[in-house]
Amino acid sequence: MSLLSQVPEDRVLSPLTGWTRAHWLAVADDLLLAVRPWATPGFARIDLPGEPSAAGWVSDGLEGFARTFLTAAFRVAGAAGEDPHGHLEHYRRGLLAGTRTPGADDAESWPPVRSIHDGGQPMVESASIALALDLTREWLWDSLSDAEKDQVETWLRQSLRHEPAPNNWYLFPLAVASFLTGCGRGDEETARTVERGLELLEGWYRGDGWYSDGDGRMFDHYVGWAMHLYPVLHAHLRSDAALAERFGGRLREFLTVFGRTFDGDGAPLHQGRSLTYRFAAVGAVAGGAVTGATPWSPGVSRSLLSGAVRHFLDRGPTVDGLYVRGWYGPHAASVQPYSGPGSPYWMSKGFVALLAPADHPLWTATEEPVPATGPARTTPVAPPGWLVQNTPDGLVRVHNHGADHHRPGQPTGVDPLYARLAYSTRTGPTTTGNVADNTVLVHRPGFLPGAPAGGEGVRAGFEPVGTGPGWAASRHRPAFAGMDLPQAHVLCVVTAHAAWEVRVFGWEAVPPGTPVSATGWALAAGRPADLSAQVSGSAVRLDGAGLQSRFQAAAGFETGDVVRAPGGTAFGRWALVPRLRGLADRSPAVATAALSAADPGPAPQVTVSDREVTAVFADGIRCRITLPAVTGDVPAVQW
C-alpha cells in the first residue's frame, strides 16, 4: 500500500485539491521507496527497467541515482534533516561507490563527465548531485572524511572542464561550482564557471521575465524548470542579495503569465520537449513560493503546485510504482532520444516546494482558485510570441507565433511540439506521420492528400510578426521537400475572445488557385467509438473526452472534412482532426475555431473586404484585422 493512500484529504485547508504538505511527503517517499529495489548493491546506480536512452544504460543508471537523489534532498532538507526512511544513507553509500573508480567496467562506477560531443549526459546529472549535496550538506557532505570529499569533488569538477550543450546545460556546471564554493572548495575555476553561466544567461534573456533556452526562440517548460530555477536557487543558497533581487524579479514577472498556463484541473501546458518530466513544470512556481519571488498568494501557489502533482497521479503515470516515459501512461512520441528510464525523475524539481517548512504560509494558507479559472481573458506575451487564452472552465489555450525549436543557422524541420499554431492543457499535437493538427498547408497543384510527403508546404521556421491585445501573428515560407514557391509566404494572424478564435491566413506571393488547407484542434481518445464528428459543408464539429472542437470556414475555404490520426496524441491513442480546404486567393482565408469543455456558443460573424477582416463576437465585441500590402509588414488589429 502506498504511503499517499494513507494520508486523508483536508478539504478545509485545501478545498480545491484536498492536499496538504503530508501528501507531498508521502509522494516523495513513495517515489524513493519504489526505486530502491532497482539499485545496484552499492546504490551507485539505479537501473530502472526499459529501453536505454541514446546515452546507454550505464549513464541511465547514473541518471536514476541523480534525479531521485534530488527528490530525497528536497524531502530531507525541508524537514530539517528528518529522514524516517533513511533515504540519505543510501545515497551517501551510492555517492562514494560511484565516484571511487569513475569509468571502470563494474556495477557501481559512474561514467566520467565529458563534453556534449562525447557522451555528455553525465554533466546533466552532476548538477542534480551537486544541488542535492548543497541542500543536505550538514547531514551528508559534512559526514564525509576529507578523502571522501576529495573523491567526490574530483568527479564533480569534470563538469567544469568540458563543453556543455549551448543552452541550459551551462547552468549544470554553474550548479556544481556553486556547491563547491558553498562548501569551502571554491577557487578561480569555480568563479569563472559561475561567471560564464550567468553571462550567457543574460544573453538569453528576452525581457518580461522570459529566457530562451539558448540562442533562437526556444520557449517551453525549460524556461521555468531550468533557466529560472538554477539561478534563483544559486542566489538563494549563496545568500547573494544582488542576484536574488535580479533573478527573483525576473521570476516574479515570468510567473505572472506562466501561472495562467496551468489548467483549472492542474494540467500544465502540453507544449515543448521533455514533457515526460511532468510536474517538474511547477518547479518555477515552487521556487518563487519558497524564495518569495512570486506574484501569487501562498493559497494560489499551493493550488497550482498540488493541482499539477495530483493531476498526474490521478491519471496513472506509474507502473509498479515506477514513473514511465510519457505524459500520463507510456507515450512513445513524448520520448526524446536522450530520455532513459530514469528521465521522468527530473520531476524532482517540483519538490522544491518541500523546502518550505511545515509552518510556511505555502502550507498553512487556505487554497485559492488558480488564475486560469478567473474571468475569460487573453494575455499577449511578446518574448515567445504567445497569446494565452483563458476561460472560466479552466481550460488554457496558447496560440504560438514565436516559440520554435531551431537555433539560427540550423536546418528547419517540423517538430509537432513547437510548430503548431496552438497548444492547450487538455489536448496534444498529433504525432509525426499523421495529419498535423492546428496548422496551415500550401499544396502543390494536383497533390493528393495522403500521398508521400513532399507535396505539402508546411509551417516550419516561422518568424514572429507581433503580439498585442487579443492577437498574435507570424509569417513563414511554405517548406516543401525539394522545392519552394519563389517568394511565397503565409501570414498567420489569430485573434481570440472568450472561447472563440478567428484565424486569418494571408497568401503572400502564393499563386491564386493554389490548393491550401488548414486544421483545427484534434481530439483524442482510447478508441474511435469515444469520439464523434459532424460535418456540415465547411463546418466541422468534434466531440469526445469532455471536449468540443469547432472549426468552420468564414472565407476562402470551400469544404470541411475530418481526418483520422491513428497515431493519436499523448491524451489518447487515436485522434480526429478537423480540416478545411480551398484555393488561395488575393484575399485572406479565414476560419473560426473553438476548443471548449462546453458549448462555446455562437461563432463570431466574419466579413472580408479586400485585405480587411472584421469579426463580431456573440457578445458584440468587434475586431478588425487589416493585413499589410507589403510582405514583412505587421498587420493592424483594432478592437
Image: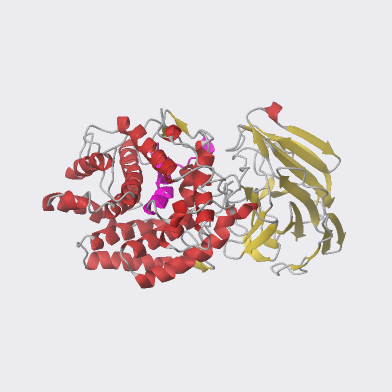
Specify the quadrant that holds the N terminus: top left
Quarter of image, res 520? top right
Give the quarter of the image for residue 380. bottom right
How many numbered dots are placed on residues in this image? 0
Say if the magenta span includes residue 343.
yes
Q: Nearer the viewer, residue 430 or 512?
A: 430
Residue lying furthest bottom: 242
The x and y percentages for residue 45 are 28, 38
Does 321 sit above or below residue 587?
above
- Colouring style: secondary structure
Asked if 454 appears above or below 196 in the picture, the reply is above
Q: Is residue 581 above or below residue 620?
A: above
Question: Residue 354, position in %: x, y?
Answer: 39, 50
Residue 597 in the image, given as x and y percentages of width and height: 70, 43
- Which span is picked out in magenta? 331-356
Can the viewer see residue 272 in this picture? yes
Q: Is residue 507 magenta?
A: no
The picture places residue 452, in percent across and down from the top left corner, at: 66, 38
In depth, the one of 392 and 119 nearer the eye is: 392
Quadrant containing the C terminus is: bottom right
**Between 214 and 592, the one nearer to me in the picture:** 592
- Residue at image location 76% in from the left, 55% down from the top: 502
Q: Residue at x 33, y 69 (%)?
A: 240
Which residue does the image show at 47% across and 68% down from the upper left? 249
Question: Predominant secondary structure in magenta?
Answer: helix
Q: Is residue 118 visible to us here?
A: no
Taking the image as shown, residue 604 lies to the left or right of residue 133, namely right
Q: Looking at this rendering, what residue extends furthest in the front direction?
A: 12
